[in-house]
Image (spheres, rainbow, N blue to C red):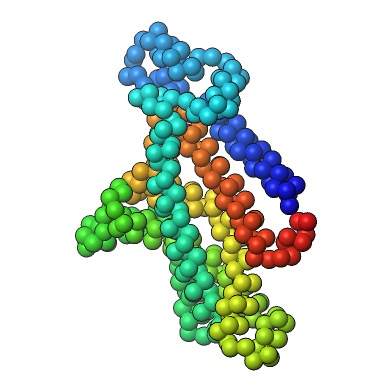
Amino acid sequence: MLGQALRRTAQMTLVVFGVVTLVFFVLRLAAGDPARLLNQPGTPETIVQQVRERLGTDRPLLVQYGHYLADLARGDLGVSFHGGQSVRDAVLEALPNTAALALVTIVVASTIALALGIAAALRPNGLVDRSVLVYVAVAQATPAFWLAVVLVLVFSINLRWLPAIDLTGPKSFVLPVATLVITLTPVLIRTVRQSFLETLSEDHVRAARARGLPERRVLLVHGLKAAALPLVTLIGLQAGFILAGSYVVEFVFNWPGIGKLTLDALASRNFPMIQGGVLVAAVAFVLVNFVVDLVYAALDPRIRLRAS
């Protein structure tokens, strides 16, 4: 078990290092010159060069990369090109808001997926099953950014029930979470439905029913545990979608999280802030998948046996 944990840690470190390296070089090779964006058009080249020297973008690319890795090893994410703010402080300030949005989304989406997926599987091709599949088809075809705008128009501008932008209280979670949940649940519902259908036809479920166990116990103990395994795995695989989707949602709803911070930095070619946001996203992605592996092993003893 310890060896498996060490291997997973090494893999996670390699993934994060690869993402950080790729982002570093792509930004500097394709994103343009930040020094020119910080100055008005027509600024003399001497002044632009001075800005490059201040930002450190005048040095050779490999030298910049070496300094970046050295600072990163000390926990220093650099200083923003705009305002001189510490990137680490800005990221740590925005991270709890994104984490709260993602956590609420995962809890709500998982609960809805389990409820609808199991309800659909209990009576295949029935009214509930067909209604759930219609919802899945419609939700899967709905773009997140379009849905976010429609929800704002209906519930914030027309009805004035919910706040449209910023994080001002519990009501601010409703529209962003609803947007992410509607775009996330179709795949989860399909997975739970299919898994539950397969579980109900397995020998241990039929044996439990043959022993006279109550149907509720059969469903909640024997069926639900097996059906939850693919849901847990899929949530880990969808962690990247949740992060990417939260970027769009944070931008539309002006949510003060990592997504908005990164997109604002991308628009202004603020390299250190972009790198800080991407680093947090990469670390969050690998950590979520690591936790999913642990939960999967706890739910399925066969995983623990194979790992040992």
Is 195 left or right of 95, judged from the image as shown?
Answer: right
Residue found farthest to the front: 2
Question: How many numbered callouts?
Answer: 0
Residue 149 spot, x, y in % from top left:
33, 55
The C terminus: image quadrant: bottom right
The residue lying at 59 percent from left, 74 percent from top is 224
The residue at 41%/53% (across/down) is 101
Between 73 and 31, the one lying in front of the other is: 73
The quadrant where residue 197 appears: bottom right
Residue 217, given in percent of the width and then of the height, sits at: 58, 83
Whether residue 183 is visible, yes or no, is no
Q: Residue at x 47, y 37 (%)?
A: 277
Q: Residue 249: x, y in percent? A: 39, 50
Q: Nearer the viewer, residue 102 or 26?
A: 102
The extreme top residue here reads 46
In this picture, is 269 found above or below 209? Answer: above
Q: Is residue 145 visible?
A: yes
The spot of residue 42 in percent (x, y) is 34, 15
Residue in the image at 48% along x and 84% along y: 127
**188 or 287: nearer the eye?**
287
Q: Is residue 166 above or below residue 265?
A: below
